[in-house]
Image (tube, grey):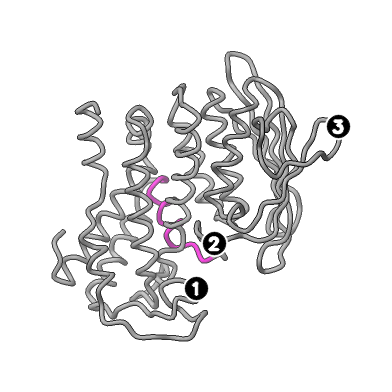
Amino acid sequence: MDQTVVSLKRAFAIGAILLLSIAQPSLAHTPRGSNGLTPGSEIVPPSLPPQFTQDILRILQALRSGNPSQRTIAEILQSTGRLYRYNEAIGKLKATISQSAVPPNEPGIEPESLGLVRLDLQRDDSMPGSIAARFARYVNTLGNQNGQFRIFGNDRQGVSREMRVEILPKSEGQVELQFTSKDATGNPKTETILAPNADVAAVLAGLISALDLANASSFTLQAATKMVLSLGQINLTLAEIEQLSQSLTESLIATESMLAGCGESAVACTTLNMNGLKLAIQSYNRLVNETNGSALLALSKNPEFQILGNTLRQIRATLASQTGGKP
């Protein structure tokens, strides 16, 4: 591996000392479905020194009083919406896809209508990371052809979910993506994004679809779009497209709502999702370690990506200083 890339990965990776300090507290048990480390984990977070939550509030205040990119990351961290975590099945979802987008011998595909096929997304296939990788692959398979797909069905809460994506190749290798979903009132909303090339369009298609279906906030969708567009005219293999779409999905979902218990006007954090912090750092590190050198170099120049990594690093160092760990 190029030494520049090795140095870049080392610079962006967040140390794992924090994970050890979280994983080994004296743990109490709580009923399934309580405010444990994960839904139904039956474990509550360790108690933390009051100074730690004060330091967290100072980090958030600095973000909120900063530039637009910093404010976006603060909004993501403090989002309070119902988000499906990246390792949670969203529900009973189906998809219809342009036949030309489906690789040969793709399992589970059945005829639908002229030019379209359908697919049932089984439990594991309806996890956000799996959705991102799968539909990034389908858009990559399209190449320079027009195509579409629609993912729909009910989530585990019985709420109807739907995302439609139109893929429209343009001049000079650009690709227009039209994402249509429903807003909070149930009315359709359409977002149009112009990707610089087909590879970046494939990453975006999987990422934005997965985030929207997982009920991610508008701030997370905004940051995701900016991160991917920062890749520019990069060329990626199919494996790199799938990895990048899935890794970005998992990292952003793990980050969202991590500090939801630390309100904008709060004097202390009412709750702190320690398992969320652990997962956010793990998924961010996977993104850094698994992304190819050219893509990581482009991401490293994106303000949202920089701020996200710096914020996680600050929180880790703060917790390490309060619990006797090493920064």
Magenta span main SS: helix
Give the quarter of the figure containing the C terminus.
bottom left
User: Which residue lies at the image location 59% right of the left edge and 47% below the top edge?
Assistant: 131
Q: Mark 2 points at which residue?
A: 88
User: Which residue lies at the image location 74% right of the left edge and 31% below the top edge?
Assistant: 99
Identify the mark at residue 211; answer none if there is no mark: none
Q: Where is residue 313 in the image (x, y as percent from the top left)?
A: 26, 54
Q: Mark 3 points at which residue?
A: 114
Relative to 178, is 129 on the left or the right?
left
Q: Within 10 Å of the Cα at label 3, are there few (<14), some (14-19), or many (20+) other Cα atoms?
A: few
User: Which residue lies at the image location 33% right of the left edge and 47% below the top edge?
Assistant: 307
Label 3: state its secondary structure.
Answer: loop
Relative to 317, is 180 on the left or the right?
right
Whether residue 76 is in magenta: the answer is yes
Q: Which of marks 1 and 2 is nearer the N terminus?
A: 1
Amino acid type indicated by mark 3: Leu
Relative to 44, is 176 on the left or the right?
right
Residue placed farthest to the top in the image?
A: 172
The reply to whether discs 1 and 2 touch (Cβ–Cβ < 8 Å) is: yes
Q: Where is residue 62 in the image (x, y as percent from the top left)?
A: 31, 56
